[in-house]
Structure formats: C-alpha cells, structure tokens
Image: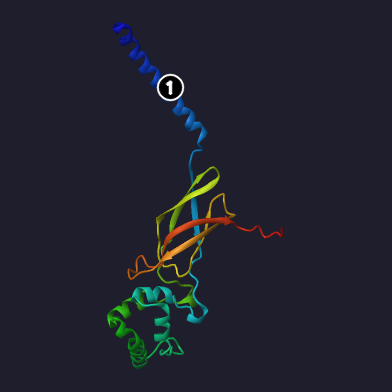
Amino acid sequence: MTNCSAMMIPALRNGLRGLAFVVGLGFGAVSAAETTAPVSFSGGHETDPKDGGRPVVLVAAGLEVKPEVFREAFRGVTPAKDGKPSPEHARQNKAALMKVLKPLGVTNDRLDEVSNYYRYQPQKGDLWPTAPAKAHAIIEDGKIKQIVVTEAGSGYSSPPTATVKGMEKTSLTVTLQFGKDLKTNGGVASVSAGAPKASGKSQ
C-alpha cells in the first residue's frame, strides 16, 4: 500500500497541474482582452466674454486668488487706447491692481511674473503658453473601462473636447486642475466617460 500510494502522488500532482493549465486557458478565452485607444483633445482655450480675452482663471490661479477677486482688481485698470500705456499710465494700473491684491499676499514681482507669462496678442493669432494633454482609453467588451492621462498638459482655460478614436459618440468629461505652478496650471486632472453623445436625430 505504501509503495502504491507513493507512486500515485506524483501522478496526482501532474494531473492537478494539467487541470489547472486547462482551467486557466478556459478562463482566458472567456474574458475579453483589454485594448487601448488614443484620446484626442481639441479646444480648451475659451475665455469668459466679460474678461476681454484675458485667461482670468489661469492668471488668478497663478496669483493664488479666486477669479472673481482678480476681476474686481482689474476693474480699476484703464487699458491704453493704442495698446501701449505710458510709464505713468502703467504705474496707475499697477497701483489699482495691487490695491486689491496686495492684502491677499500678492507681491509686485509675482504680479509681473504671472502677467508677463500670460500676456499675448490675439490680434496676431497668438495664444498664451500652452502644452497639449495626452491620454489613452482602456477598452473592455467594447466599453471604456478607464481613461489614463499620461500628460496633463497646461494652459487650458476651459475644458477641452476629448474623444476616443473609434468611439467618437461616447461623451467624455474633462476636469481641469489649476495652481500656482505656471508650467502645470490649467492641466487635465482626469477624463471620465459618460453616456454616448446624441446623434442629432430626433427619436
């Protein structure tokens, strides 16, 4: 009996290994494999009509104040008619801004740094500094399981439109992040999938 049992144990072990291998193959065949698809971003540089083209959400975040606070400060500014203020005019505008911002901890140097960084000439087709975001979608069983943001980008003043290649009818929601670091300010924090976009046809 002892010899027989000893002979059966290796065979039993081999049988279990074989069974485990077959079961593993079975499970792999049933579950759908995950695939990836690139996510494209477009737009995302709109400004509030009342801001006169200024990316206030970005400037305010860079100064660590709320957008409405910066708007209040800017009400005391009188832009030069020819776009080139005199030194005296520039000092008056700076004083108006600092009157509101200085009590909140904004220094003159920081105001200059942020203002210069986001200064641009829209009439020449310019735009403030931006960097495009990059992401990809993980797809399982024909549905978006997760969207991975690999590069947040920067300079988005409004949520860009995001689409997954091959799944353009699926609505995506983009959430932005703002902060004092100008190189990452206005980056994409996350992208989530929602219901498919309406086709435009009445049901």
Q: Nearer the viewer, residue 88 or 15?
A: 15
How far across and how far down the image is residue 194, in percent? 54, 56
How many numbered tags mark residues here?
A: 1
Q: Residue at x 48, y 78 (%)?
A: 53
Vertical relation: 6 (above or below) 124:
above
The quadrant in which the N terminus is found is: top left
Q: Amino acid at mark 1?
A: Leu
How far across and how far down the image is residue 165, in percent? 54, 51
Q: Is residue 106 left or right of residue 51?
A: left
Q: Give the residue at the far right of this rendering.
A: 203
Q: Residue at x 34, y 75 (%)?
A: 64
> What residue would you read off at disc 1?
19
Q: Secondary structure at mark 1?
A: helix
Q: Nearer the viewer, residue 160 or 173?
A: 173
Q: Give the residue at the far front of this rendering.
A: 1
Q: Is residue 102 left or right of residue 55?
A: left
Vertical relation: 158 (above or below) 115:
above
Q: Nearer the viewer, residue 24 or 185?
A: 24
Quadrant housing residue 119: bottom left
How far across and how far down the image is residue 143, in percent? 54, 47
Vertical relation: 118 (above or below) 199:
below
How far across and how far down the image is residue 135, in percent? 44, 54
